[in-house]
Image (cartoon, rainbow, N blue to C red):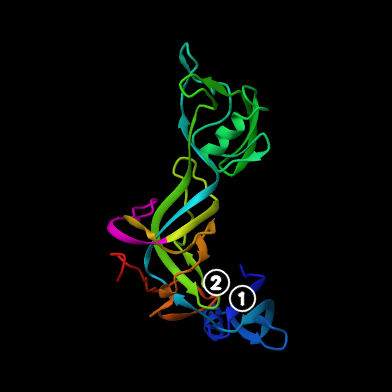
Amino acid sequence: RLPSHIEVSSTFLSDYIKTQNSKLITTKFNKQSSTIDYYLCNALKIKSVEAEVFEPKKVFLGGDALGFEYNTKGVLVLGKNKVFDGGEFFDNLTNNEIACGDVITEIDGFEVNNALQISEILNNEKNAGTSVCVKAIRKGKAYQTQIKPADDLLTKKYKLGLWVKNKVNGIGTLTYIDPNNNRYGALGHPVIDPNSGCCLEVLNGNLYDCSVLGIKRATRGNAGELRGVLKVKSVLGSVEKNVLDGIYGEVCDKTLLLNRKEIEIGGKHTVVPGKALVYCSIDGKR
């Protein structure tokens, strides 16, 4: 099946056209109409595909192992916690929909990004002891439910009875840095919560130097991982997005730009089956 639109660097245009040729089909680039024309037996034109040929763009090649940590948009539910009301410990979440792996985003119309914000909303004069509307996300789908907080005798505060977290950290491989704006891409895959399988959105975060201590080998159906220690006093940049093809942000430490190899981006349509060179670090440095 032929695409309806092709994006390709002018450097890789001729290579791309060669990959489309076969014993029956030949392709030619029509500069006047900016299309790639497909011919049957080099005679009968069967289709024209719009081609966007862009000027070569170069980026700095990555390969470094870097650490990252970011605060999530919303709080991730890790588990439930019984609340002591003076008579007994009880679970005030028995009859509601919240489950482990859900991401709570709002309570009574207020955005929540950490446990302290939840406590402040539940214990303000308006809400103290009353049911609240909780909005959450489960496996990419939003829902809402009503919960009446429990009065915890030990802390003298109203609580939902949940364990939550709002920080994510790890180690991954830098893919590239754009020298024109110091933007970077890393990992090549999203940061996923193992309980919910969700891609956890970024509120804000930092990129760090790190030391690699070991490697967990990948197996069929399970990604491998680098294991190590973040050097949190060495901030190298920001973490701004966590999406399906990796994490993104901006480099602030200009030493990351030094002594790097420049490579040209060819466009997604230049990717074909064949041999590839993997550039990576196994010790955090080399």
Q: What residue did someone put label 1 on?
A: 7
Which of the marked residues, 2 or 1, is nearer the chain's N terminus? 1
46 relative position to 226: left or right = right
162 relative position to 285: left or right = right
Dot 1 falls on a residue whose secondary structure is strand
* In the image, residue 170 above or below residue 178: above
Residue 30 appears in the picture as rendered: yes
Q: What residue did someone put label 2 on?
A: 268
Contact between labelled residues 1 and 2, with CB atoms less than 8 Å apart: yes
The residue carrying pointer 1 sits among few (fewer than 14), some (14 to 19) or many (20 or more) residues within 10 Å by Cα, namely some
Dot 2 falls on a residue whose secondary structure is helix
- Residue 215 locus on image (x, y percent): 29, 57
Work out how far the residue at label 2 is from the one at label 1, CA to CA, in angstroms.
7 Å
- Residue positioned 54% across, 58% down in the render: 241
- Residue 86 locus on image (x, y percent): 48, 13
* In the image, residue 203 above or below residue 62: above
Magenta stretch in the rendered image? 208-227
Q: Amino acid at mark 2?
A: Lys
Rendered-image quadrant of the C terminus: bottom left
**Was residue 210 drawn as part of the magenta stretch in this picture?**
yes
Main SS, magenta region, reads strand
- Residue positioned 46% across, 32% down in the render: 79
- Residue 10 locus on image (x, y percent): 58, 85
